Image (cartoon, helix red, strand yellow):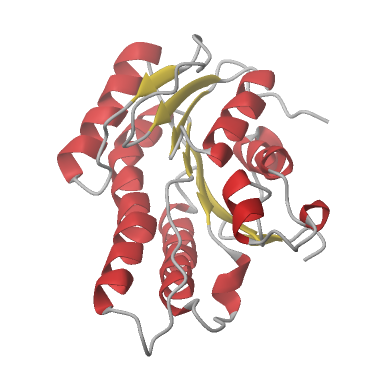
Amino acid sequence: MTHSLNHKTIAVTGGFGVLGRAVADALQAAGAHVALIDKSLAPADLNRDVLALPNVELGQVCDARRAMDQIVTHFGGLDGLVNAAGGFRYETIETGSVETWDRLYAINVRTALLASQAALPHLVARGGGRIVYVGANAAAQAGTGMGAYAAAKSGVARLTEAMAEEFKDGGITVNAVLPSILDTPANRADMPQADPARWVSPAALAQVIVFLLSDASAPITGALIPVKGRV
């Protein structure tokens, strides 16, 4: 079942990545106008109906605000934000560096915060909206080599909860999806002995995100939703 997002405008950070593009496809299938924000160059095969905003440093306040303003100018408003920008590094505490902790905070938490702050005035102007964060199931308990990543994604979870409380009477719902392992080319290369059929496909996760952006999810806010596949 596809939930309708007809005439809704949705921004997706990390939009040129594997998950971001899967979310874009699902959003367009649901009838939404889609804007993809990313720090890299736009892929040559990107759908022409998508508004592509490349070279955006979401860790910078001015870049985040400029991107949201461009989306509103182009489409006439903003109804939702998907924060899919982020990153991962496997590094033990014994042999690792504090710079990794700073870096994973910056690309997972800071980008989500600044994108949300930049989007909020436009969502408020619309009378409400939806924010969905991409967290991680691994944040519930960190294993070896996962400390910095789990800490950063725990920050995303706390951001989700705090924003949901702040806007629960303002018509803006804020939720997070917590995938286990996404079936991406990078993960297949890193874990060649694993069975990717047990993982979560980007397309499947995108459908959960579409639901959280839809009117059907109106009663849900502050939720941290595990999407684990069979991991």
| Residue 68 placement: quadrant | top left
Q: Say above or below: 154 vs 127.
A: below
Q: Going 53% across and 59% down the picture, which residue do you hit? A: 135
Answer above or below: position of 140 versus 36.
below
- The correct choice, above or below, for 122 with respect to 147 in the image is above
Give the x, y percent position of residue 74: 34, 12
Indicate the quadrant containing the N terminus: top left, top right, bottom left or bottom right.
top right
Residue under the point 75% across and 62% down:
194
Q: Residue furthest bottom?
A: 94
Q: Position of residue 134 (x, y in %)?
A: 53, 52
Asked if residue 220 shows in the view, the reply is no
What quarter of the picture does the C terminus occupy? bottom right
In this view of the protein, which residue sits in the foreground, 188 or 68? 188
43, 140: nearer the viewer: 43
Relative side of 180 to 1, left or right? left
For this view, does 62 lie left or right of residue 40?
left
Where on the picture, by quarter, is residue 180? bottom right
How far across and how far down the image is residue 89, in percent? 44, 65
Between 127 and 72, the one nearer to me in the picture: 72
Q: Residue at x 32, y 51 (%)?
A: 111
Q: Quadrant of residue 36?
A: top left
Q: Is residue 47 left or right of residue 211?
A: left
Query: What residue occupies the far top of the structure in this picture?
Result: 48
Rendered view: 67 above or below 222: above
One can see residue 192 in this view:
yes
**Residue depicted at 80% across the width and 58% down the height:** 195
Q: Where residue 123 appears, x then y in whole percent?
A: 40, 34
Number of marks drawn: 0
Front position in the image: 80 or 104? 104
